[in-house]
Amino acid sequence: MDRSVVLGVAVISTWALAACDRSSPPARPPVQGAAVRAEVDRLTLAYSNCVDAKARTRPIADEVAGTLADTFEAECAPARATLAAKTAIFYRIGHPRTSPGQAANVADASVKNLEDEIRSRAVIAIVERQNAAKAK
């Protein structure tokens, strides 16, 4: 046989064996966004739990529920700030051309949307506690 035929058969055999290799590809490293998203979720829960815990346990007397909820949100401001900062980081992963200032604005608006729900839950909890106290 001609050397070129032998070489051709060897190359084709190698390609065929490579094509038959069914081993799984190497595992991908974790995606940065997934880790930051998990952290944003954890911080969201921490902020929400901070306000909820205050609404369910703090003395409420006959104060206006909305005013108390505002007070509890203000007391949880450090948790909110941490959440907003991490949300801005998460946003920039998906939108790398966004400036830090723009990402901070988007993050603040995002947290504000959550705050409306958190505040509503706090007001409901306070009013329920006040009604229960009046019923006694």
Image (cartoon, helix red, strand yellow):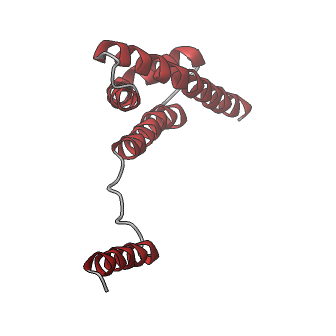
**118 above or below 28?**
above
**85 above or below 31?**
above
Q: Foreground residue, 47 or 62?
A: 47
Residue 104 quadrant: top left
Question: Can you name the residue that lies furthest to the left here?
Answer: 3
The residue at 41%/31% (across/down) is 94
Q: Foreground residue, 84 or 11?
A: 11
Location of residue 75 in the rendering, given as x and y in whole percent from the top left corner: 37, 24
Location of residue 22 in the rendering, given as x and y in whole percent from the top left corner: 45, 76
**31 above or below 7?**
above
Residue 71 quadrant: top left
Q: Quadrant of the N terminus?
A: bottom left
Location of residue 14 in the rendering, given as x and y in whole percent from the top left corner: 34, 76
Location of residue 15 in the rendering, given as x and y in whole percent from the top left corner: 38, 72
Q: Foreground residue, 10 or 40?
A: 10
The residue at 39%/14% (across/down) is 105
Q: Foreground residue, 123 or 3?
A: 3
Question: Can you name the residue that lies furthest to the bottom here?
Answer: 1
The residue at 71%/35% (across/down) is 136
Question: Can you name the residue that lies furthest to the right here?
Answer: 135
Task: Report the side of 15 relative to 64 (left or right).
Answer: left
Give the number of marks.
Answer: 0
The residue at 28%/77% (across/down) is 7
